[in-house]
Image (spheres, rainbow, N blue to C red):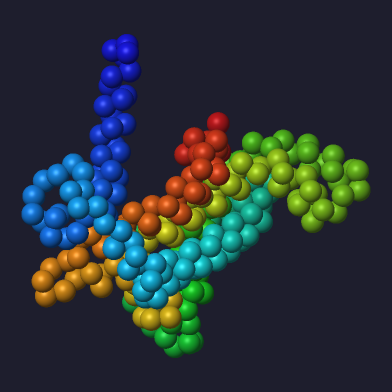
Amino acid sequence: MQRRYLVPLFYILFLMLPIYWLVAMSFKTTNEILSGFSLFPQTFTLANYKEIFTDPTWYWGYINSIIYVSLNTVISVCVALPAAYAFSRYRFLGDKHLFFWLLTNRMAPAAVFALPFFQLYSAVGLFDTYLAVALAHCLFNIPLAVWILEGFMSGVPKELDETAYVDGYSFPAFFTRIFLPSIKAGVGVTAFFCFMFSWVELLLAKTLTAVEAKPIAAVMTRTASSAGYELGLLAAAGTLTIIPGAIVIYFVRNYIAKGFALGRV
């Protein structure tokens, strides 16, 4: 092996080490984890995963998270598409200021909005529902989605719009049949970022739910007891939370680099 490959190899191994350690811990008992250092499980066990898949509180935590994250992704992308098209194709009074204002929503920490959302949703009866968390995450994901999609749309020549109108396409037909397929990579990357930001967000998801829509991140706090944390169970739950994100990354893997450039390539 050439020396030039050693640095990236060690770097990749360094990045993968925490993931490996988490997976290895998930097949250990808490006593073994606390007893000392070991690279591999000395007593291999599936009891941690069995408890997660048989305890309704655990597996419903995953189901709840997937539901509100998927709902948020759909809402964010559907709202951001027409907004991004307007910013990329039209010029109006205050357009640049409005575009910048959208981004400022990403600059504020989620803790700032936790109490207002809690009081608002409690008053209108949305507390502890999937819609409550999905709408709360829209505050951060829609501006990001508009920013990314606007970059992809600006890369599509305006002549495409004009040619479609000359050919007799209505705007809905042009947008769905011609324009969206031309930016499908941008839509995929935008959905990926919305999914991931909503999936890893904890504060709002935990504050706005109690029982019915409780996310897996909040359920994981159940491992605490008077004797400490059930580390093996916590590691198994953490391992399973990686899987949805890995699946999403697999489907958009060819477009992620362009997404990090926000479509401006």
Q: Could you tell whether 35 is left or right of 174 in the image?
A: left
Q: Is residue 151 above or below residue 242?
A: above
Total numbered labels: 0
User: Split into 4 quadrants, where in the image is the N terminus?
Assistant: top left
Q: Residue at x 46, y 54 (%)?
A: 244
Q: Is residue 172 left or right of residue 185?
A: right
Tell which of 82 and 88 is nearer to you.
82
The extreme top residue here reads: 2
Q: Is residue 57 above or below residue 184?
A: below
Residue at the farthest front position: 43
Q: Residue at x 44, y 60 (%)?
A: 198
Is 72 situated left or right of 231 in this image?
Answer: right
Q: Is residue 192 shown to the viewer in this render? A: yes
Q: Which residue is rendered at x = 59% and y = 61% of the image? A: 74
Locate the C terminus by quadrant: top right
> Is residue 50 placed above or below 90 in the rendered structure?
below
Q: From where the camera sits, is residue 205 visible?
A: no
Residue 185, position in %: x, y?
61, 41
In front here: 108 or 254?
254
Instruction: List x then y, in percent, for residue 197.
Output: 42, 55
Query: Picture quarter containing residue 30?
Result: bottom left
Residue 259, horizontal then vertical, whole percent: 51, 40
Q: Position of residue 127 (x, y in %)?
A: 43, 82
Of residues 12 and 109, the one nearer the viewer is 12
Seen at 38% across and 57% down, the residue is 241
Eyeballing the image, is 132 above or below 77?
Answer: below
